[in-house]
Amino acid sequence: MPEPLLDVRALDAYYGDFQALFRVSLRVAAGEVVAVIGANGAGKSTLLKCIAGVIPSRRDAILFDDEPIGDAPAHTVVARGIALVPEGRRLFSSLSVEENLLIGGQLGRPGPWRLSRIYELFPTLAARRHAPSTSLSGGEQQMVAIGRALMSNPKLLLCDEISLGLAPVVVRDVYARLPAIVSEGSSLIIVEQDIVQALKAADHVYCLQEGRVALAGAAATLTREAISAAYFGA
Amino acid sequence: MEWANIVIQGVLIGGLYAMFAAGLALIFGVMRLVNIAHGDLIVLAAYIALMTTDTLGMNPLLAILIVAPIMAAIGYCLQRALLNRTLGNDLLPPLLVTFGLSVIIQNALLELFTADSRRLSAGAIEVASFPLAPGIWIGVLPLLQFVVAVAVIGALQLLFYRTAFGRAFRATADDQSVSQLMGLDNRHVFALAMALSLAVIAVAGVFIAVRTNFDPAIGPARLIFGFEAVIIGGLGSMWGTLAGGIILGVSQAIGAQINPGWQLLAGHLAFLLILALRPEGLFPKVKG
Amino acid sequence: MTAAFKVEHATRSSRIGMAAFALALLLLAAAPAWGGRDDLRLLAEIYAYVALASLWNLLAGYAGLVSVGQQAYVGLGAYVLFASTILAGVHPLLAVPVAGAIAAIVALPVAGLMFRLRGHYFAIGTWVVAEVFRLSASQISALGGGSGISLPASIVTAMAPSRQLREFLIYWVALALMVAVLAAIVLLLRSRYGLALTAIRDNELAARSSGVDVTRTKLVVYILTALGTAMIGALIFLQKLRISPDTAFSVNDWTAFVIFITVIGGIGRVEGPIIGTIVFFLLRQTLADLGSLYLLMLGAVAIAVMLLAPKGIWGFLAGRFGWQLFPLERRLRFAADARTT
């Protein structure tokens, strides 16, 4: 079996004295889409933040391309090829749409994603490229956030609750772009509360419950009962 | 015609005040830090210019080319070694540390150079002037300083809004955590901002050294002028800062004309008036 | 109906501390008996700094209003004293509370302007106000303009017939003023205002949403601090017998030293300024000859403390050993605890 692109091994995470993750293990292979589901507070966002370097971890708890990156600060993790689309979009409010995208490409990592390609993927953005990023609708802002992360040409894209606050029609629209992203060479981890969407998009699913992995498996093989039990706790 | 000359002088010195303000506003915009030692750093630049012209014998205005990089380097190191450690949610540490820094710089300069007043000579340009219109004379040096001030502010605007560099500053100012996700190292970005601020301060410091007598104690007054120009002009706009500086300069000039002892007071009162009537400043940034 | 709970303030540590403090006060009150003229002057100076630093601490450490312009009120108080005694014939000791009252009145519109500025900008704004006061004072020719004025002999002798008695009088007033300031601060902090202040200090937004009138609380603290600072300033310059704009509104004397004292002693704790003043004066006695080097070192020490031990000396001791000098803790004792179930 080939080495996974991302290998998370027995990861613990703390906020001060509060432990948010307990020995969480997870793997993402190249070209794979992995969904992480779970109730509010299960630790999904925390997991992504640890991988992205926003929360420091034990050095060898996270291996990327065989390199231990657990304690690497966030700005170096991007350079290695992991990009995070943060929860709640978090666009730069004093930058225009295009400037938000450009700053995503700050590092100049080589790859297929450039401004023109992003505008191909999200055509509505091209028309609003000079608008202040905050004047866009929720769905459009989500697209900018994804595009911004793609501009760093990541090997692994982390999407934190991209369906949050969006109408179902918009969510379907955003999810419809994911296959194009994967085909350009990025693997995905999507954190979702929308289980239906997550299961449709993912190859593998992990379910977190109170900071622990309660269920893991290929999306096609998991039953609704198993997921329910893992999601809410037996 | 007398009043026209007064106003013009006020406008010209306003450019200098705008430069004090630009460095201050830049830092506050990027990292929410107000450097109480700002004025003392201007004086430090003046003394570095003094040492440069003494040892190299060059014209002080040319010395800017040496003083600016030196000050920029000082700013970078200062931020990384000391001031980065004060940043955070708490107001007290950066304020008190920069206050301590102000006291340290003043007294270090006092020890090294004594309290004697100094001034740098720029040669014949100091007294040159030319008539703009019948009865209205403009000093060449003040005009040069004003033009340079406007150029510096224009360059800063360009930098902030047209370059990747400036984009990085603005993004970091918007959201310090997400900017890291773009690959920006905050410690480095802040240090660059401070280096830039000190480079601007260097120009201001050299101008002061040539224009007036300076001694280690004049720093706080420069900080206050810069601060007043920022508040009058409105936070968030470089050109507003220029307007603020000009208004301050003109107020002071008018005050001085009425009574020489009222020069500074007139400027302060203009500031307090704006604070009372329009606290957001005359040209605040309009948030979208 | 009896209350379901009681709020207790004292701890064992504070009982010991208060006893020691009371003893020290008795000793100090008797100082004219055992101390010489220089001792009394030094002690009066120490009292002034303890009081000034305590007030600054209240403003910055509790109300979150970091001012680098309190010298405005020191000078204002001093000038009101000189003006009211020289120009209006008020008795010098009576002029001290008059100075406080006038400062409190002036502080209201000043606060109105200054509260429009946030955080760091508030700090510099207070400095501007101090500068305005200083420049205005130097325009008053009746009080010596820019070079200042001495207190006329007639007014000095009006205080007491002999010089020795005058010195004792000023000494006791200084001691009483310091005790009054400390007592007022402790009482304020024990009151509901104090609870509001602690809430504001910890999280202003949360305090506001809990119903605390943040602006009014800050305003009250600002005005009270101005009042106290002005009275201390009046007394300081009554002792000096001479005033000038630069000395009355000196940033170094009335702000830099005060800030360093409070930072080193411990911000946000009432005991901090006391410890800080003691350390400051010990340093000064040993290092005074160094002039500007002394200030330089003080600045460096303050920076080091701010970065490495932000709670200051007392903060460290209180954190480590749980010491408390003043009874300021709040513990709930429920009536139910007394009953057996």
Image (cartoon, coloured by chain):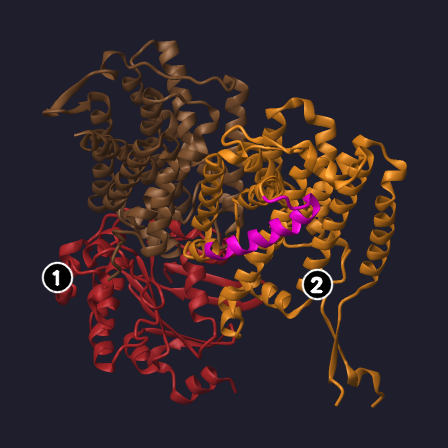
Q: Is residue B278 above or below residue B26?
A: below
Chain letter, red: A
Q: Is residue B144 left or right of residue B23?
A: left
Magenta stretch bounds: C88-109
Q: Quadrant of residue A27?
A: bottom left
Residue A164: x and y in percent read 32, 75
Do badges 2 and 1 share one subunit? no
* Residue depicted at 65% across the width and 33% down the height: C152
Q: Quadrant of residue C293?
A: top right
**Residue closer to the observer: A11 or B259:** B259
Residue B27: x and y in percent read 37, 43
Looking at the image, how many numbered discs can be counted on the residues?
2
Chain letter, orange: C
Q: Name, please, the residue furthest toward the right.
A: C34
| Other residues around mark 2 within 10 Å, as few (<14) / some (14–19) / many (≥20) | some
Residue denoted by label 2: C187
